[in-house]
Image (tube, rainbow, N blue to C red):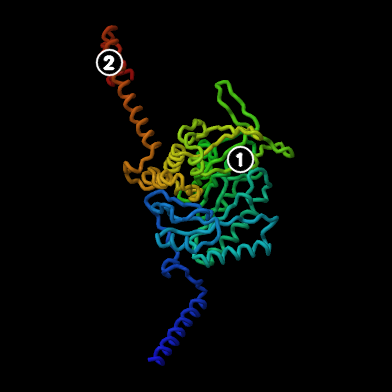
Amino acid sequence: MGRLSVIIVLISFCLSEVTCNNAAAHGDPPCHCKSRDMCNVIPRIPKQRMEAFVVTEGKSSHKEWVWDHITMVLNKGADNNELMCHAHSLGVGYAIMEEIPVYENYTGNKNYSDWVERVGNRVKAMHADGVSVNLLDLVGQCQADAEHIDKVTDAVGQVYRKIKSEGWPKLLCIVPWMPPCYQGQCHLTSDLLRYCDYFVTNPDSYITSCNLQCRAQATIPKSRMVLGIDEYLAIGVQRNQLLMGIPWHGYAYKCDKVKVTKDNTRICMLSKDNNTNECDFKGSRTRWSISDIMANYPQQFSKHNWDGLQAAPYFSTNFLNKTVNETHSFWFEGMDSLLDKYQVVKGAELEGVVIWSGDDLTNKITDAKNQMIWNWMIHVLFLTGSPVQKNQMDMAGKAAGIGVGCFLGGCLFGFLVTCVAYTKRIKKMKVRKPFEKDDYLGDEYHDDDDNL
Protein backbone atom coordinates (compact mmCIF):
# COMPACT_ATOMS: atom_id res chain seq x y z
CA MET A 1 0.00 0.00 0.00
CA GLY A 2 2.89 2.33 0.66
CA ARG A 3 4.33 1.93 -2.84
CA LEU A 4 0.88 2.36 -4.40
CA SER A 5 0.38 5.62 -2.49
CA VAL A 6 3.72 6.93 -3.71
CA ILE A 7 2.87 6.03 -7.30
CA ILE A 8 -0.50 7.79 -7.05
CA VAL A 9 1.14 10.92 -5.65
CA LEU A 10 3.75 10.94 -8.43
CA ILE A 11 1.08 10.51 -11.12
CA SER A 12 -0.99 13.34 -9.62
CA PHE A 13 2.06 15.58 -9.48
CA CYS A 14 2.92 14.87 -13.10
CA LEU A 15 -0.63 15.58 -14.21
CA SER A 16 -0.67 18.87 -12.32
CA GLU A 17 2.64 19.82 -13.89
CA VAL A 18 1.28 19.05 -17.36
CA THR A 19 -1.82 21.11 -16.65
CA CYS A 20 0.23 24.05 -15.36
CA ASN A 21 2.63 23.83 -18.29
CA ASN A 22 -0.27 23.79 -20.76
CA ALA A 23 -1.82 26.84 -19.04
CA ALA A 24 1.53 28.62 -19.12
CA ALA A 25 2.01 27.68 -22.76
CA HIS A 26 -1.32 29.29 -23.60
CA GLY A 27 -0.38 32.35 -21.55
CA ASP A 28 -3.24 31.89 -19.09
CA PRO A 29 -2.54 33.66 -15.77
CA PRO A 30 -3.29 31.80 -12.56
CA CYS A 31 -6.78 32.07 -11.10
CA HIS A 32 -6.95 32.97 -7.41
CA CYS A 33 -10.69 32.32 -7.08
CA LYS A 34 -12.36 29.21 -5.68
CA SER A 35 -13.46 28.24 -9.16
CA ARG A 36 -11.76 28.82 -12.51
CA ASP A 37 -15.12 29.96 -13.87
CA MET A 38 -14.89 33.06 -11.66
CA CYS A 39 -11.87 34.20 -13.67
CA ASN A 40 -13.80 34.26 -16.94
CA VAL A 41 -14.63 37.61 -18.46
CA ILE A 42 -18.19 38.72 -17.70
CA PRO A 43 -20.04 39.27 -21.01
CA ARG A 44 -21.62 42.70 -21.46
CA ILE A 45 -25.27 41.94 -22.14
CA PRO A 46 -27.59 44.90 -22.84
CA LYS A 47 -29.98 45.22 -19.93
CA GLN A 48 -33.47 46.65 -19.68
CA ARG A 49 -32.49 49.24 -17.09
CA MET A 50 -29.93 51.91 -16.37
CA GLU A 51 -26.47 50.57 -15.58
CA ALA A 52 -24.87 51.27 -12.19
CA PHE A 53 -21.06 51.24 -12.08
CA VAL A 54 -19.32 51.77 -8.71
CA VAL A 55 -15.82 53.17 -8.10
CA THR A 56 -13.78 51.93 -5.14
CA GLU A 57 -10.47 53.20 -3.81
CA GLY A 58 -10.00 50.16 -1.59
CA LYS A 59 -10.89 52.09 1.57
CA SER A 60 -13.85 49.94 2.57
CA SER A 61 -14.91 46.33 2.75
CA HIS A 62 -16.75 45.48 -0.45
CA LYS A 63 -18.70 42.86 1.48
CA GLU A 64 -20.60 45.68 3.20
CA TRP A 65 -21.94 46.92 -0.13
CA VAL A 66 -25.33 46.08 -1.58
CA TRP A 67 -24.51 44.41 -4.90
CA ASP A 68 -28.04 43.84 -6.22
CA HIS A 69 -27.93 46.46 -8.96
CA ILE A 70 -24.20 46.90 -9.64
CA THR A 71 -23.08 46.30 -13.22
CA MET A 72 -19.33 46.75 -12.81
CA VAL A 73 -16.91 47.78 -10.06
CA LEU A 74 -14.05 50.10 -11.06
CA ASN A 75 -11.06 49.53 -8.78
CA LYS A 76 -8.98 52.67 -8.29
CA GLY A 77 -6.95 51.06 -5.51
CA ALA A 78 -4.41 48.26 -5.52
CA ASP A 79 -5.18 45.03 -7.38
CA ASN A 80 -7.59 42.96 -5.30
CA ASN A 81 -8.16 39.33 -6.25
CA GLU A 82 -10.75 38.91 -3.52
CA LEU A 83 -12.78 41.81 -4.90
CA MET A 84 -12.52 40.48 -8.45
CA CYS A 85 -13.59 36.98 -7.41
CA HIS A 86 -16.49 38.31 -5.36
CA ALA A 87 -17.69 40.51 -8.23
CA HIS A 88 -17.43 37.71 -10.80
CA SER A 89 -19.20 35.27 -8.49
CA LEU A 90 -22.18 37.65 -8.59
CA GLY A 91 -22.01 38.20 -12.34
CA VAL A 92 -20.62 41.73 -11.82
CA GLY A 93 -17.77 43.02 -13.98
CA TYR A 94 -14.39 44.07 -12.61
CA ALA A 95 -12.30 46.88 -14.11
CA ILE A 96 -8.98 48.49 -13.22
CA MET A 97 -8.55 52.27 -13.13
CA GLU A 98 -5.47 54.08 -14.38
CA GLU A 99 -4.27 57.67 -14.65
CA ILE A 100 -2.68 58.29 -18.05
CA PRO A 101 0.74 59.89 -17.45
CA VAL A 102 1.37 63.25 -19.11
CA TYR A 103 4.30 63.54 -21.55
CA GLU A 104 5.27 66.03 -24.24
CA ASN A 105 4.75 63.35 -26.89
CA TYR A 106 3.62 59.73 -27.01
CA THR A 107 4.84 58.46 -30.35
CA GLY A 108 8.01 56.39 -29.81
CA ASN A 109 8.02 57.26 -26.10
CA LYS A 110 9.55 54.28 -24.29
CA ASN A 111 8.37 55.45 -20.86
CA TYR A 112 4.81 55.53 -22.11
CA SER A 113 5.04 52.24 -24.01
CA ASP A 114 6.36 50.62 -20.80
CA TRP A 115 3.37 52.04 -18.92
CA VAL A 116 0.97 50.69 -21.56
CA GLU A 117 2.64 47.27 -21.24
CA ARG A 118 2.11 47.32 -17.47
CA VAL A 119 -1.57 48.14 -17.99
CA GLY A 120 -1.91 45.18 -20.34
CA ASN A 121 -0.24 42.90 -17.81
CA ARG A 122 -2.64 44.09 -15.08
CA VAL A 123 -5.62 43.38 -17.33
CA LYS A 124 -4.38 39.88 -17.97
CA ALA A 125 -3.37 39.08 -14.39
CA MET A 126 -6.63 40.38 -12.89
CA HIS A 127 -8.93 38.82 -15.52
CA ALA A 128 -10.37 42.32 -15.91
CA ASP A 129 -13.54 43.02 -17.85
CA GLY A 130 -12.62 46.64 -18.42
CA VAL A 131 -10.00 49.37 -18.13
CA SER A 132 -10.93 52.92 -17.15
CA VAL A 133 -8.37 55.60 -17.98
CA ASN A 134 -8.57 59.06 -16.48
CA LEU A 135 -7.94 61.65 -19.20
CA LEU A 136 -8.47 64.81 -17.13
CA ASP A 137 -4.80 65.73 -16.66
CA LEU A 138 -3.96 64.75 -20.22
CA VAL A 139 -6.89 66.59 -21.80
CA GLY A 140 -6.51 69.72 -19.69
CA GLN A 141 -9.48 71.84 -18.74
CA CYS A 142 -8.38 75.34 -19.59
CA GLN A 143 -6.29 76.45 -22.56
CA ALA A 144 -4.26 74.26 -24.94
CA ASP A 145 -3.18 74.41 -28.58
CA ALA A 146 -4.89 72.50 -31.39
CA GLU A 147 -1.99 70.01 -31.68
CA HIS A 148 -3.08 68.69 -28.30
CA ILE A 149 -5.85 66.74 -30.05
CA ASP A 150 -3.37 64.51 -31.88
CA LYS A 151 -1.38 63.95 -28.68
CA VAL A 152 -4.43 62.80 -26.68
CA THR A 153 -5.71 60.61 -29.53
CA ASP A 154 -2.32 58.92 -29.92
CA ALA A 155 -2.05 58.23 -26.18
CA VAL A 156 -5.52 56.68 -25.92
CA GLY A 157 -5.04 54.71 -29.15
CA GLN A 158 -1.97 52.95 -27.75
CA VAL A 159 -3.87 51.84 -24.63
CA TYR A 160 -6.80 50.69 -26.75
CA ARG A 161 -4.68 48.51 -29.02
CA LYS A 162 -2.86 46.94 -26.07
CA ILE A 163 -5.88 45.97 -23.99
CA LYS A 164 -7.81 44.71 -27.02
CA SER A 165 -4.87 42.45 -27.86
CA GLU A 166 -5.26 40.90 -24.40
CA GLY A 167 -8.86 39.93 -25.05
CA TRP A 168 -11.93 42.11 -25.28
CA PRO A 169 -12.04 44.31 -22.15
CA LYS A 170 -14.07 47.49 -22.41
CA LEU A 171 -12.21 50.82 -22.43
CA LEU A 172 -13.88 53.46 -20.29
CA CYS A 173 -12.55 56.98 -20.90
CA ILE A 174 -12.97 59.33 -17.93
CA VAL A 175 -13.51 62.78 -19.41
CA PRO A 176 -14.46 66.33 -18.31
CA TRP A 177 -18.11 67.21 -17.82
CA MET A 178 -18.15 68.92 -21.24
CA PRO A 179 -16.34 68.05 -24.51
CA PRO A 180 -13.06 70.03 -24.62
CA CYS A 181 -12.17 72.40 -27.46
CA TYR A 182 -8.77 73.78 -28.45
CA GLN A 183 -8.51 77.01 -30.44
CA GLY A 184 -11.97 76.47 -31.85
CA GLN A 185 -11.34 72.82 -32.76
CA CYS A 186 -13.71 70.47 -30.92
CA HIS A 187 -13.24 67.16 -32.72
CA LEU A 188 -11.21 65.41 -30.01
CA THR A 189 -14.26 63.60 -28.64
CA SER A 190 -15.34 62.42 -32.08
CA ASP A 191 -11.78 61.13 -32.65
CA LEU A 192 -11.90 59.22 -29.37
CA LEU A 193 -15.08 57.46 -30.50
CA ARG A 194 -12.77 55.05 -32.36
CA TYR A 195 -11.31 53.87 -29.08
CA CYS A 196 -13.59 54.58 -26.12
CA ASP A 197 -16.37 52.07 -25.49
CA TYR A 198 -17.78 54.37 -22.82
CA PHE A 199 -17.36 58.02 -21.87
CA VAL A 200 -17.53 58.62 -18.11
CA THR A 201 -17.94 62.19 -16.90
CA ASN A 202 -15.79 62.89 -13.86
CA PRO A 203 -17.94 64.42 -11.09
CA ASP A 204 -15.04 66.53 -9.82
CA SER A 205 -14.40 68.14 -13.22
CA TYR A 206 -17.16 70.74 -12.93
CA ILE A 207 -15.17 72.98 -10.60
CA THR A 208 -11.85 74.28 -11.87
CA SER A 209 -10.05 77.61 -11.88
CA CYS A 210 -11.16 78.19 -15.49
CA ASN A 211 -13.35 81.30 -15.49
CA LEU A 212 -15.50 80.36 -12.52
CA GLN A 213 -16.77 82.57 -9.72
CA CYS A 214 -14.54 82.26 -6.69
CA ARG A 215 -17.22 81.00 -4.31
CA ALA A 216 -18.35 77.80 -2.66
CA GLN A 217 -20.69 75.89 -4.94
CA ALA A 218 -22.22 72.53 -5.73
CA THR A 219 -19.94 69.77 -6.97
CA ILE A 220 -22.33 69.27 -9.90
CA PRO A 221 -24.59 72.24 -10.71
CA LYS A 222 -27.65 70.83 -12.47
CA SER A 223 -27.62 73.33 -15.35
CA ARG A 224 -24.02 72.43 -16.26
CA MET A 225 -24.81 68.73 -15.99
CA VAL A 226 -27.63 69.07 -18.52
CA LEU A 227 -25.47 71.24 -20.79
CA GLY A 228 -22.62 68.71 -20.72
CA ILE A 229 -24.95 65.85 -21.66
CA ASP A 230 -26.36 67.81 -24.59
CA GLU A 231 -22.88 68.72 -25.85
CA TYR A 232 -21.64 65.11 -25.80
CA LEU A 233 -24.74 63.89 -27.63
CA ALA A 234 -24.45 66.70 -30.19
CA ILE A 235 -20.83 65.81 -30.98
CA GLY A 236 -21.67 62.20 -31.78
CA VAL A 237 -21.47 60.23 -28.53
CA GLN A 238 -24.34 57.75 -28.40
CA ARG A 239 -26.64 57.65 -25.39
CA ASN A 240 -25.63 54.06 -24.65
CA GLN A 241 -21.96 55.16 -24.54
CA LEU A 242 -22.37 57.93 -21.96
CA LEU A 243 -22.12 57.25 -18.23
CA MET A 244 -22.72 60.09 -15.79
CA GLY A 245 -20.37 60.26 -12.82
CA ILE A 246 -22.35 60.86 -9.61
CA PRO A 247 -20.54 61.78 -6.36
CA TRP A 248 -21.42 60.24 -3.01
CA HIS A 249 -19.32 62.93 -1.38
CA GLY A 250 -19.23 66.68 -0.93
CA TYR A 251 -16.80 69.41 0.07
CA ALA A 252 -16.27 71.70 3.02
CA TYR A 253 -15.15 75.13 1.78
CA LYS A 254 -13.09 77.42 3.98
CA CYS A 255 -14.50 80.90 3.46
CA ASP A 256 -12.05 83.75 2.96
CA LYS A 257 -14.97 86.13 3.56
CA VAL A 258 -18.74 85.93 3.64
CA LYS A 259 -20.74 88.14 1.28
CA VAL A 260 -24.31 89.01 2.24
CA THR A 261 -26.74 89.73 -0.61
CA LYS A 262 -29.83 91.98 -0.58
CA ASP A 263 -32.06 89.03 0.31
CA ASN A 264 -29.72 88.15 3.23
CA THR A 265 -28.23 85.11 1.47
CA ARG A 266 -24.76 84.41 2.79
CA ILE A 267 -22.23 83.56 0.06
CA CYS A 268 -18.95 81.90 0.96
CA MET A 269 -16.19 83.62 -1.04
CA LEU A 270 -12.89 81.74 -1.44
CA SER A 271 -9.30 82.89 -1.42
CA LYS A 272 -7.24 83.35 -4.58
CA ASP A 273 -3.78 82.12 -5.48
CA ASN A 274 -1.31 84.95 -4.94
CA ASN A 275 0.77 84.00 -7.99
CA THR A 276 -2.00 83.51 -10.57
CA ASN A 277 -4.86 85.48 -8.98
CA GLU A 278 -7.08 82.51 -9.85
CA CYS A 279 -9.45 80.93 -7.40
CA ASP A 280 -7.69 78.42 -5.18
CA PHE A 281 -10.33 75.70 -5.22
CA LYS A 282 -7.94 72.91 -4.22
CA GLY A 283 -6.53 74.78 -1.24
CA SER A 284 -9.92 76.04 -0.09
CA ARG A 285 -11.86 72.81 0.12
CA THR A 286 -11.72 69.41 1.83
CA ARG A 287 -13.56 66.33 0.61
CA TRP A 288 -16.18 64.83 2.93
CA SER A 289 -18.07 61.60 2.33
CA ILE A 290 -21.83 61.49 2.74
CA SER A 291 -21.49 59.14 5.71
CA ASP A 292 -19.03 61.47 7.50
CA ILE A 293 -21.33 64.47 7.02
CA MET A 294 -24.28 62.45 8.26
CA ALA A 295 -22.30 61.30 11.31
CA ASN A 296 -20.76 64.65 12.28
CA TYR A 297 -23.53 67.03 11.22
CA PRO A 298 -26.77 65.04 11.45
CA GLN A 299 -29.05 68.04 12.04
CA GLN A 300 -27.50 70.12 9.27
CA PHE A 301 -27.65 67.16 6.92
CA SER A 302 -31.36 66.73 7.53
CA LYS A 303 -32.27 70.44 7.73
CA HIS A 304 -30.01 71.81 5.04
CA ASN A 305 -30.43 74.86 2.84
CA TRP A 306 -31.32 74.33 -0.80
CA ASP A 307 -29.90 76.17 -3.80
CA GLY A 308 -32.61 76.06 -6.45
CA LEU A 309 -30.36 77.21 -9.29
CA GLN A 310 -27.72 74.54 -8.70
CA ALA A 311 -30.23 71.99 -7.33
CA ALA A 312 -27.97 71.10 -4.42
CA PRO A 313 -28.05 71.14 -0.60
CA TYR A 314 -25.63 73.13 1.56
CA PHE A 315 -25.15 74.49 5.06
CA SER A 316 -22.65 76.76 6.83
CA THR A 317 -20.96 76.33 10.18
CA ASN A 318 -18.51 78.35 12.27
CA PHE A 319 -15.38 76.96 13.91
CA LEU A 320 -14.70 79.02 17.03
CA ASN A 321 -11.88 78.45 19.50
CA LYS A 322 -8.88 80.30 20.85
CA THR A 323 -6.79 79.98 17.69
CA VAL A 324 -9.33 79.60 14.88
CA ASN A 325 -12.34 81.64 13.88
CA GLU A 326 -13.42 80.29 10.50
CA THR A 327 -16.62 79.90 8.55
CA HIS A 328 -16.99 76.76 6.45
CA SER A 329 -19.65 76.10 3.84
CA PHE A 330 -20.57 72.45 3.17
CA TRP A 331 -21.92 71.54 -0.26
CA PHE A 332 -22.84 67.90 -0.65
CA GLU A 333 -25.20 65.37 -2.20
CA GLY A 334 -28.30 64.46 -0.24
CA MET A 335 -31.12 62.14 -1.10
CA ASP A 336 -33.07 64.94 -2.74
CA SER A 337 -30.23 66.12 -5.02
CA LEU A 338 -29.23 62.58 -5.97
CA LEU A 339 -32.81 61.78 -6.87
CA ASP A 340 -32.79 64.81 -9.15
CA LYS A 341 -29.56 63.72 -10.85
CA TYR A 342 -30.77 60.16 -11.39
CA GLN A 343 -33.93 61.55 -12.96
CA VAL A 344 -31.87 63.66 -15.39
CA VAL A 345 -29.84 60.62 -16.45
CA LYS A 346 -32.95 58.51 -16.85
CA GLY A 347 -34.77 61.26 -18.76
CA ALA A 348 -31.82 61.63 -21.15
CA GLU A 349 -31.88 57.84 -21.69
CA LEU A 350 -28.16 57.51 -20.96
CA GLU A 351 -26.49 54.14 -20.36
CA GLY A 352 -26.33 54.76 -16.63
CA VAL A 353 -24.36 56.22 -13.75
CA VAL A 354 -20.95 55.74 -12.15
CA ILE A 355 -21.13 56.08 -8.36
CA TRP A 356 -18.05 57.89 -7.01
CA SER A 357 -17.46 56.05 -4.70
CA GLY A 358 -18.75 53.02 -2.83
CA ASP A 359 -16.25 53.75 -0.04
CA ASP A 360 -18.16 56.90 0.92
CA LEU A 361 -20.76 54.86 2.82
CA THR A 362 -18.65 52.99 5.37
CA ASN A 363 -19.14 54.94 8.59
CA LYS A 364 -20.28 52.57 11.34
CA ILE A 365 -22.21 55.35 13.09
CA THR A 366 -24.59 55.65 10.18
CA ASP A 367 -24.90 52.01 9.11
CA ALA A 368 -28.71 52.10 9.05
CA LYS A 369 -28.81 55.18 6.84
CA ASN A 370 -26.00 53.83 4.66
CA GLN A 371 -28.01 50.68 4.01
CA MET A 372 -30.91 52.94 3.15
CA ILE A 373 -28.85 54.86 0.58
CA TRP A 374 -27.61 51.66 -1.05
CA ASN A 375 -31.16 50.31 -1.27
CA TRP A 376 -33.26 53.43 -1.48
CA MET A 377 -35.87 54.14 -4.10
CA ILE A 378 -33.34 55.53 -6.56
CA HIS A 379 -31.66 52.20 -7.22
CA VAL A 380 -34.89 50.22 -7.05
CA LEU A 381 -37.24 52.48 -8.99
CA PHE A 382 -35.05 54.50 -11.33
CA LEU A 383 -32.43 51.89 -12.13
CA THR A 384 -34.69 48.84 -12.41
CA GLY A 385 -38.18 50.19 -12.95
CA SER A 386 -39.49 48.04 -10.07
CA PRO A 387 -42.00 49.36 -7.55
CA VAL A 388 -40.68 50.66 -4.24
CA GLN A 389 -41.37 48.76 -1.05
CA LYS A 390 -42.55 50.91 1.82
CA ASN A 391 -39.74 49.85 4.11
CA GLN A 392 -37.17 51.00 1.54
CA MET A 393 -38.36 54.60 1.40
CA ASP A 394 -36.30 56.99 3.49
CA MET A 395 -37.57 60.15 5.13
CA ALA A 396 -36.60 62.24 2.13
CA GLY A 397 -38.61 59.96 -0.12
CA LYS A 398 -41.58 60.09 2.22
CA ALA A 399 -41.37 63.84 2.45
CA ALA A 400 -41.22 64.09 -1.33
CA GLY A 401 -44.26 61.82 -1.65
CA ILE A 402 -46.24 63.83 0.90
CA GLY A 403 -45.23 67.06 -0.80
CA VAL A 404 -46.34 65.84 -4.22
CA GLY A 405 -49.61 64.56 -2.77
CA CYS A 406 -50.32 67.88 -1.05
CA PHE A 407 -49.45 69.77 -4.22
CA LEU A 408 -51.80 67.69 -6.38
CA GLY A 409 -54.56 67.83 -3.76
CA GLY A 410 -54.19 71.58 -3.46
CA CYS A 411 -54.32 72.00 -7.23
CA LEU A 412 -57.53 69.93 -7.45
CA PHE A 413 -59.16 71.80 -4.56
CA GLY A 414 -58.19 75.15 -6.06
CA PHE A 415 -59.54 74.12 -9.46
CA LEU A 416 -62.94 73.15 -7.99
CA VAL A 417 -63.20 76.37 -5.97
CA THR A 418 -62.29 78.44 -9.03
CA CYS A 419 -64.90 76.67 -11.19
CA VAL A 420 -67.66 77.28 -8.62
CA ALA A 421 -66.72 80.93 -8.17
CA TYR A 422 -66.46 81.47 -11.92
CA THR A 423 -69.89 79.91 -12.55
CA LYS A 424 -71.56 82.15 -9.96
CA ARG A 425 -69.87 85.22 -11.41
CA ILE A 426 -71.00 84.34 -14.92
CA LYS A 427 -74.59 83.97 -13.78
CA LYS A 428 -74.51 87.37 -12.06
CA MET A 429 -73.07 89.04 -15.17
CA LYS A 430 -75.56 87.27 -17.42
CA VAL A 431 -72.80 86.46 -19.88
CA ARG A 432 -73.32 83.69 -22.43
CA LYS A 433 -71.54 80.42 -21.78
CA PRO A 434 -68.53 79.71 -23.96
CA PHE A 435 -69.43 78.59 -27.51
CA GLU A 436 -73.13 79.38 -26.90
CA LYS A 437 -74.77 80.01 -30.35
CA ASP A 438 -74.74 83.63 -31.44
CA ASP A 439 -76.87 84.24 -34.55
CA TYR A 440 -74.78 87.18 -35.68
CA LEU A 441 -71.13 86.50 -34.78
CA GLY A 442 -71.32 82.75 -35.07
CA ASP A 443 -72.03 82.88 -38.82
CA GLU A 444 -68.50 84.16 -39.46
CA TYR A 445 -67.04 80.79 -38.33
CA HIS A 446 -69.38 78.44 -40.21
CA ASP A 447 -67.83 76.30 -42.97
CA ASP A 448 -70.71 77.11 -45.32
CA ASP A 449 -69.79 80.77 -45.40
CA ASP A 450 -68.88 81.58 -49.02
CA ASN A 451 -66.32 84.16 -47.89
CA LEU A 452 -64.15 81.63 -46.05
Q: For the N terminus, give its image quadrant.
A: bottom left
Q: What residue type is labelled 2?
A: Val
Residue 194 shows in this picture: no
- Which of the two marks, 2 or 1, is nearer to us in this view? 1
N-terminal of the pair, mark 2 or mark 1, is: 1
> For the view shown, which residue lies furthest in the right direction?
275
Secondary element under disc 1, as helix, strand or loop, is: strand
Image: 329 above or below 181: above
Q: Nearer the viewer, residue 163 or 31?
A: 31
Q: Residues within 10 Å of mark 2 (few under 14, many from 20)?
A: few
Residues at circles 2 and 1 in contact by the CB criterion of under 8 Å: no
Q: Quadrant of residue 163?
A: bottom right
What amino acid type should be assigned to the residue bearing mark 1? Answer: Arg
The percent coordinates of residue 320 (x first, y second) are 61, 32
Task: State which quadrant residue 269 falls in.
Answer: top right
Question: Which residue is under mark 1?
Answer: 285
Name the residue: 56% across, 22% down.
Answer: 264
- Secondary structure state at the residue bearing disc 2: helix
Q: Identify which residue, 221 or 263, lies in the foreground.
A: 263
Residue on which disc 2 sits: 420
Q: Residue at left 60%, top 52%?
A: 135
Local crowd size for mark 1, using a 10 Å CA cut-off: few (<14), some (14–19), many (≥20): some
**Residue positioned 58% across, 60% down in the render:** 159
Q: Where is residue 114 in the image (x, y as percent from the top left)?
A: 64, 65
Residue 13's x, y, as percent? 46, 84
From what the image shows, is residue 42 above or below residue 334? below
Between 356 and 305, which is closer to the camera in this rendering? 305
Expressed as whole percent of the image width and height from the top left, the position of residue 54 reads 47, 52
Describe residue 41's horizontal placement relative to residue 220 as left or right: left
